[in-house]
Image: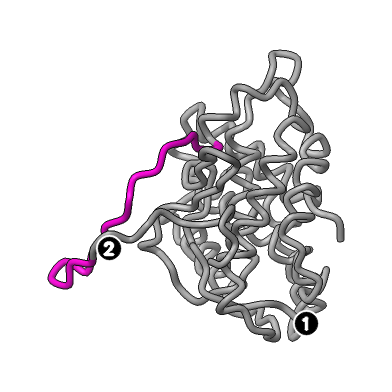
Amino acid sequence: MKQPLLTTPKALAFVETECALIMDDVKGDSLQNLLPQFANITDASAHLKNAGRWIASFQQSTAKPATFDTKPHMNWLLKKLKRHAENLTVIPDYDAFMPHFRQLEQIAAEAQTQPCTRCVTHRDFHLGNLIFGRKGVVYGIDFENNKPDDALRDVISFLFAFVMKWRGAPSESAPAIESFQPAAAAFWEGYADPSTSPKVLDFFQKFSALNGWSGLDARHLTDQRRHRLERLKQLANTSLLPL
């Protein structure tokens, strides 16, 4: 990563027998720990823009143009529907889930073979793995899950984590999804991927929301999982990023 303000901790050693990379500890605060300092959602915009810049810098060296394939994603959801039909799991609010799945099938037909970007992705890019250090340096940490994938995987997982973790001021205890759009737009401004088709972005958000929704078993819904379910329903219905 050539940009000194967008970097990683220094590599200190590599232990071959354990396949373990030992990296320097860095002083700073994760974005997750910084969230309570923001009085409203848009206060996080500058940090989210830097988050977008960091993941773009991380992906850049391996990024290459590709055509999007919706089939692996759709097949994954079909397996979950099969498990529901066999009563191995119970998708919460299944009757509400299925219309969204049918919409996703239509979006998939439009997104198939559209331009996208593939690269080595972080695959665990969330608010706790982005550290804001001294003198404006932004560090990414935890790289054991790196793997070639669709670049948007990192984008959507990070923004979904922001939506799930946000608590904000008491007046914003339950903001509508539309309230997150300016902050998500700031992230996208920092990320700046002009090569990915808007249809792919539309598909990836809705797929990710339905994937998370279908991963919650109605027989084991804690209060935290109910909160997550409600957010995922909103994310399945409303675009975070400009299309």
Q: Crowding near pointer 2: few (<14 within 10 Å), some, many (20+)?
A: few
Q: Residue at x 74, y 66 (%)?
A: 203
Q: For residue 58: magenta?
A: no
Could you tell me which secondary element the residue under label 2 belongs to? Answer: strand
The residue beneath circle 2 is 21
**Residue closest to the far left:** 17
Extent of the magenta region: 14-31
Q: What colour scheme was applied to this rendering of the protein?
A: one colour
Q: Nearer the viewer, mark 1 or mark 2?
A: 2
Q: Position of residue 163 (x, y in %)?
A: 65, 39
Whole-number angstrom distance, CA of label 1 to CA of label 2: 37 Å
Could you tell me which secondary element the residue under label 1 belongs to? Answer: loop
Q: Residue at x 50, y 37 (%)?
A: 30
Q: For residue 18: magenta?
A: yes
Left or right: 19 as drawn, with respect to 51 = left
Left or right: 64 as drawn, with respect to 8 = right
The residue beneath circle 1 is 114
Residue 73 versus residue 128: which sits nearer the camera?
128
**Residue closest to the far top:** 170
Residue 220 versus residue 120: which sits nearer the camera?
120
Task: Examine the image and state in which quarter residue 25 appears.
Answer: top left
Q: Residue at x 23, y 63 (%)?
A: 13
Q: Quadrant of the C terminus?
A: bottom right
Above or below residue 37? Residue 193 is: below
Q: Crowding near pointer 1: few (<14 within 10 Å), some, many (20+)?
A: some
